[in-house]
Amino acid sequence: MDSNPRLTWYLRQRNRILKKRDIASSEDNKKKMRDLIGDQKAIAPQLFNDDQYCGNYDAFELANEDGELEAFLKL
């Protein structure tokens, strides 16, 4: 089951690929996420466009409400 259906729908509508990284079973993925964010205590979910940090899921929802998703996702 998709835990973020709105995000998945939005990206599919724009022919974008969503890649999920499991940070629970991979310390390397967790370290990379935290290094890219610059916060060694950051928790998932976090959103990136390649290696560009966009924000967390709450920020995604806020950008959606404000009509700012293109800018938020750096598309």
Image (cartoon, rainbow, N blue to C red):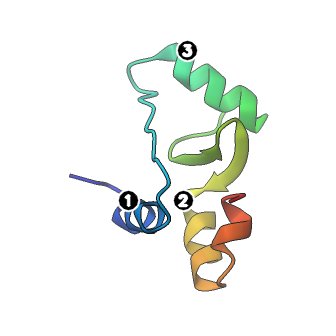
Q: Position of residue 68 (x, y in %)?
A: 69, 77
Q: Position of residue 3 (x, y in %)?
A: 32, 55
Mark 2 sits on what residue?
57
In the image, is 7 to the left or to the right of 74?
left
Residue at the spot x=45%, y=39% of the render?
19
Q: Residues within 10 Å of mark 3 (few under 14, many from 20)?
A: few
- State the mark number for residue 41: none
* Tag 3 near tag 1, CB within 8 Å: no
The tally of labels here is: 3
Residue at the spot x=50%, y=54% of the render?
16
In the figure, 65 relative to 60: above or below? below
Distance of mark 1 from mark 2, alpha carbons? Answer: 8 Å
In the image, is 4 to the left or to the right of 29?
left
Tell me the element at label 2. Answer: helix
Residue at the spot x=58%, y=84% of the render?
65
Q: Residues within 10 Å of mark 1 (few under 14, many from 20)?
A: few
Q: Position of residue 54 (x, y in %)?
A: 69, 53
Mark 1 sits on what residue?
4
Tell me the element at label 3. Answer: helix
In the figure, 42 relative to 27: above or below? below
Residue at the spot x=70%, y=64% of the render?
72
Pick whichever of labels 3 and 2 is earlier in the sequence.
3
Pick whichever of labels 3 and 1 is earlier in the sequence.
1
Mark 3 sits on what residue?
28
**Nearer to us in this view, 70 or 15:** 15
In the figure, 12 relative to 26: above or below? below
Pick whichever of labels 1 and 2 is earlier in the sequence.
1
